[in-house]
Amino acid sequence: MKASAAPYLHPLLANCRDYWLGWGAQDRQDDCLTYYRSGLPHPSLNGVLRLHSSTPIDPWIEHGAHVLAGVPWMWWVGPDSSTEVRNRLVDFGATRAGSMPIMAVDTDRVPDISGPPSLDIQTVDTMDSLTEWVRVYSSSFGFASHLLDSIVQCEAARPDTPDLVRFTGRFQGQPVGTALMLDAHGVAGIYVVTTAEAHRHRGIGSALTSAALRAGRERGLRTGTLQASNQGAGVYRRMGFQMIDQYELFQLPPL
């Protein structure tokens, strides 16, 4: 069940947009349409994030399909999009690929979670550690191994690097998990929370999320936000997160 719409909903959405726009080219926003295009062949790395327009929606849908042609991509429909976007996408032949709860928590109310013994959480601050970090999360997101170098280059080139803190979790010395905190719009956005499959259900993801929230709290950020997977939503609820709203994800056929 949704929590009542919090007054900080718009900063939560803006933080999410900023994170994904970090994957895109410089010409990633056209008036009412906000999109990102990394050019990499994976649907999570290219997409439309928002269509907010009082003008007819159909030309903007056609424009979105045009600027993202040639790569797999998703269309996000959230509370910051015009109300008719969802229905018009369906009319254009789009299929619903899933949904993601938009969740939020007061950073002061999340206890520090250390995770299992032998878990060491470190910040990522060199190119070697960035390459390792990408390698760890790539398998969880289903990124092909041949994309590793390109993804590392995209990560290294992000314009918001000063506002990011990346974390790698090591269990008995082996890198097994990742997380990221983005300081933007007065909110600690939590992204890239992954745990290697062989090490799941041990509290590693919770410990990495806690470390990312702590980094936000140390910067004076009192609200944390994330978009949960179906597998992760229950974990985040137990940490104190509440569902505020949700994004729906759509895939359009070529127009």
Image (spheres, grey):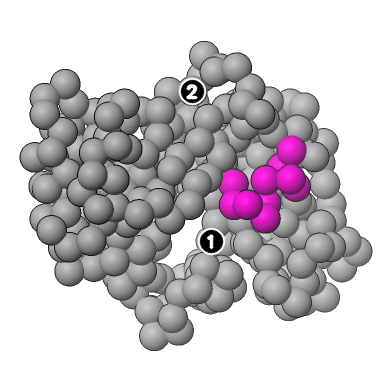
For the magenta stretch, what is the residue range? 228-237
Question: Who's the residue at 40% across and 51% down the image?
Answer: 96
**What SS does tag 1 mark?**
loop
Mark 2 crowd level (few <14, some 14–19, many ≥20, 10 Å Cα): some
Q: Residue at x 68, y 60 (%)?
A: 122
Across and down, in percent, residue 186 comes to 49, 26
Label 2: element kind: helix
Q: Place residue 237 in its image quadrant.
A: top right
Measuring from the top left, give residue 88's x and y in whole percent: 24, 38
Disc 1 marks which amino acid? Asp
Say if residue 180 shows up in the picture. Answer: no
At a point 67% along the width and 55% down the height, the residue shown is 231
- For label 2, the residue is 9
As drawn, 189 above or below 94: above
Q: Mark 1 and mark 2: span between their CA atoms?
A: 31 Å
Q: Which numbered disc, 1 or 2, marks the residue closer to the eye?
A: 2
Residue at x-position 63% and y-position 22%: 3
Q: Label 2 sits on what residue type?
A: Leu
> In the shown orientation, is residue 111 left or right of residue 193?
right
Write down the residue under mark 1. Answer: 125
Q: 1 or 175: which is nearer to us?
A: 1
